[in-house]
Image (cartoon, rainbow, N blue to C red):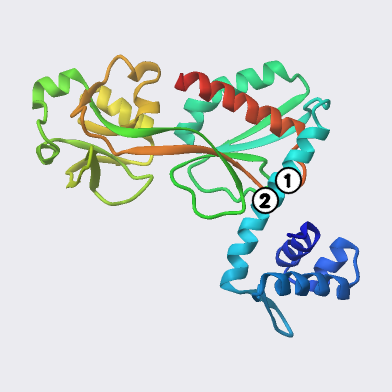
């Protein structure tokens, strides 16, 4: 049977980077910390940590075990915290980060609902396309798109979207509508550079997948600029649905090659694994779930 205390001590040692620091943080004798990790390794029958005089190193098994244990401990802590905090009211500053375009499209209604429901919270919203280190920059929660790398962050899927081809009716009347993705080589293409500097567009139609080396008339890391240029008949843009179907773009862009798209891309909220999920964060996550659930229904 698993010993949660041994697992917690092991995780503390890895996070602290040494037995001595972990013992100090846990307020335990160093010998007790070493013994608990040794007992855990004996029970599992594998070495989790390689010890040297200067530094400890995780074995391959130890690294995978640490990631799994961190998630499990965080979920246990969240369950306990949720039980204890049900009567507490959200208060204080919540720091949020999100990609510029996705955050603008998704968070407006979420924040409206959140701030209206909880009068004692304040929000600091950082919209940036760089990946923010939540722990380093003291950020509570992030919205992220795409498949996540392995991480000790807690991730909750909140929906998804895909990149589709759009142009104005006037552009298609002037330049003609492509009948196949290969016809895009004869068109002015407006390319997003946020994912890659490659001029290739990857499109799929069921099980058929193609890479098209498009002539990029305009490249930009700003999706709204590309959508605006498409509206102004500059060319064909590969845009995420959450951009093309919002605001002024929704009624002025025509879907091109509607059977083709980039494929689905998931959206997540992520936050650091922690022993206590604050009421302000818990309430924000609930608002995100409510809004994205309504959008999917």
- Residue holding disc 1: 76
Nearer to the camera, 148 or 8: 8
The secondary structure type at the circle numbered 2 is: helix
Residue 2 point in image, percent of width and height: 73, 59
The residue that mark 2 highlights is 72
Can you tell which quarter of the image residue 127 is in?
A: top right
The answer to whether any part of residue 136 appears in the image is no
Relative placement, left or right, of 215 versus 269 is left
The answer to whether one can see residue 294 in this image is: yes
Q: Are marks 2 and 1 in contact (CB under 8 Å)?
A: yes
Q: Secondary structure at mark 1?
A: helix
Q: Residues within 10 Å of mark 2 (few under 14, many from 20)?
A: few
In the rendered view, tell whether residue 273 sits above or below residue 105.
Answer: below
Compared to residue 167, the image places residue 94 above or below, namely below
Q: CA distance from mark 2 to mark 1?
A: 6 Å
Q: Measured from the top left, where is residue 160 in percent x and y?
A: 43, 33
Q: Residue at x 23, y 37 (%)?
A: 206
Residue 235 quadrant: top left
Q: Is residue 106 left or right of residue 24?
A: left
* Residue 210: numbered disc: none
- Image quadrant containing the N terminus: bottom right
Percent across and percent down for residue 32 are 87, 71
């Amino acid at each position: 049977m698993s010993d949660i205390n041994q697992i917690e001590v092991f995780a503390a040692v890895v996070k602290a980077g040494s037995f001595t620091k972990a013992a100090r943080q846990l307020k335990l004798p160093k010998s007790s910390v070493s013994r608990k990790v040794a007992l855990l390794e004996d029970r599992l029958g594998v070495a989790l940590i390689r010890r040297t005089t200067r530094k400890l190193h995780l074995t391959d098994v130890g690294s995978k075990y640490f990631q799994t244990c961190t998630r499990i401990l965080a979920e246990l802590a969240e369950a306990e915290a949720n039980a204890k905090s049900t009567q507490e009211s959200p208060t204080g500053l919540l720091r949020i980060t999100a990609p510029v375009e996705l955050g603008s499209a998704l968070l407006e209604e979420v924040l409206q609902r959140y701030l209206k429901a909880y009068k004692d919270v304040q929000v600091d919203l950082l919209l940036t396309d760089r990946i923010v280190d939540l722990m380093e920059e003291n950020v509570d929660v992030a919205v992220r798109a795409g498949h996540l790398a392995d991480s000790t962050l807690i991730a909750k899927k909140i929906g998804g979207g895909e990149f589709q081809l759009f142009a104005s009716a006037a552009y298609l009347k002037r330049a003609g509508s492509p009948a196949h993705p290969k016809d895009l080589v004869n068109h002015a293409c407006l390319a997003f550079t946020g994912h890659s500097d490659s001029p290739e567009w990857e499109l799929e139609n069921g099980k058929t997948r193609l890479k098209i080396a498009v002539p990029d008339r305009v490249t930009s890391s700003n999706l709204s600029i590309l959508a605006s240029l498409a509206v102004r008949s500059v060319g064909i843009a590969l845009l995420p649905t959450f951009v093309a179907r919002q605001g002024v773009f929704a009624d002025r862009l025509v879907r091109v090659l509607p059977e083709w798209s980039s494929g689905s891309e998931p959206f997540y909220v992520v936050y650091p694994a922690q022993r206590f999920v604050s009421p302000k964060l818990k309430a924000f996550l609930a608002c995100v779930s409510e809004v994205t659930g309504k959008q999917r229904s």
